[in-house]
Amino acid sequence: MATEHGIPKLRIVEPSFDSPLTSVIIDLEKLRDNRLDSKTHPGIFFQIKHIFQLLESLGSARIEGNNTTIAELVEKEISGSRNDDEIIGDDEINEIRNAERAMDFIESRIKNNSKIDQAFILNLHKIVVENLAREGSRNPGELRFVDVGVGAHKPLPYTNVKKHFDELVDFINQKKQKKYDLLITAIAHHRFAWIHPFDNGNGRVVRLLTYAMLIKQGFNVKMGRIINPTAIFCINRDRYYEMLSQADRGRDSDILAWCEYVLKGLLEEIHKIDRLLDRDYLVQKILMPALDFCLDRENIMKREHAILKSSITTDNMELTASDLEKIIPGKLPSEKSRILRKLKQKKMLVPVKEKARKYIIHFKHSYLLRGVIESLTHEGFIDKEFSIKS
């Protein structure tokens, strides 16, 4: 074990050529360079992406003891009570809102090869803990100046935090061959948790930082891939903490075990979510069952079901007033316009762009979201236990 004054040295630990970890890194490298050729409509892609940002934020909050369920969050999405920037009385919902805002902040600032500096991480912390009581901070956006305890782990004395935090930032931004990027991401995640640089919010910040590092390394999330790294950790919190504790020992074998845990989980998650960009899979396994689910529960009517079904099965996944003739023949143009207007009012259809007369299915803030979440759960994208309130 390499140490410096008794403290495990921050460095890249290289796996052997024939190790399972090396195979995982090679597979992830292929995914990083593979540009997905998705035939899913961009407007629908971004709605799916929004759902996984929601799950990312919820998952990270639940690791820290937040008891909000997917079902509760979905109802707030449908009601529109989460569509503004107001701080509401529900501390647990505000915690999830903060995480979503932090993800937007990351995507607006970090691009391929961006520098992740100290100011960026401090701003990330400030957003994460803003206006929270239970999970807030006495000093948002500042390194801690008190000693803290985290279960069995005793983080560094606060007097040593800045030195090791600066070292970590340099480690994240070091110029190395691309083959080391993913190892740097996994090792930096553990080191951040080990330093525990803030008085609160460290877990939420480090999982968001992992997201930022993946974007920095070229895992595109704009029009390409959906990434939900928190899913690696939130399904089994005990395993997450167990692996962090093992890495705390600082031995090469322990650091490599941690890296394999993180990167293997990331690989499995990317493979899983990439299926959603297969248009046929998305329609047949997610959207169609979602419509059927909503029809069975009378969230939508038979005619609405038929129209929405038609919208997702057209070649371009768009719907026009003329398409309604096949579904409800003989209707006057004014009647068709009224039917479309009602679906827009119910937030089940939206124009592809402002004032356009072409529409796509909309489930981001409508009753259809219930069906989409049900489909994602059935297909294994959401753990069934994850949505049950404890």
Image (cartoon, grey):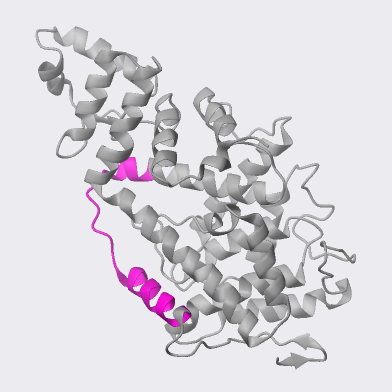
Q: Position of residue 112 (x, y in %)?
A: 43, 69
In the rendered image, the vertical position of residue 89 relative to residue 38, given as above or below: above
Report whether 107 appears left or right of 32. right
Q: Quadrant of residue 270?
A: bottom left
Q: In which quarter of the image is residue 220?
A: bottom left
Q: Is the magenta stretch mostly helix, strand or loop?
A: helix
Q: If the image is split into quadrants, where does the C terminus sit?
A: top right
Q: Where is residue 298 in the image (x, y as percent from the top left)?
A: 38, 14
Q: If the image is split into quadrants, where does the N terminus sit?
A: bottom right
- Count of numbered labels shown in the rendering: 0
Q: Which residue is drawn at 58% across and 86% down?
A: 12
Q: Which of 380 and 181 is in front in this view?
A: 380
Q: Position of residue 379 (x, y in %)?
A: 38, 43
Report whether 253 appears left or right of 31. right
Q: Which residue is drawn at 56% across and 56% down?
A: 230
Q: In which quarter of the image is residue 274?
A: bottom left
Q: Which residue is drawn at 53% across and 79% down?
A: 183
Q: Which residue is drawn at 72% across and 60% down?
A: 202
Residue 361 shows in the view: no
Report whether 152 appears left or right of 378. right
Report whether 309 appears left or right of 238. left
Q: Where is residue 109 in the image (x, y as percent from the top left)?
A: 52, 60
Q: What stretch is highlighted in magenta?
A: 21-46
In the rendered image, the vertical position of residue 4 relative to residue 311, given as above or below: below
Q: Is residue 122 magenta?
A: no
Residue 79 shows in the view: yes
Q: Which of 176 and 259 is in front in this view?
A: 259
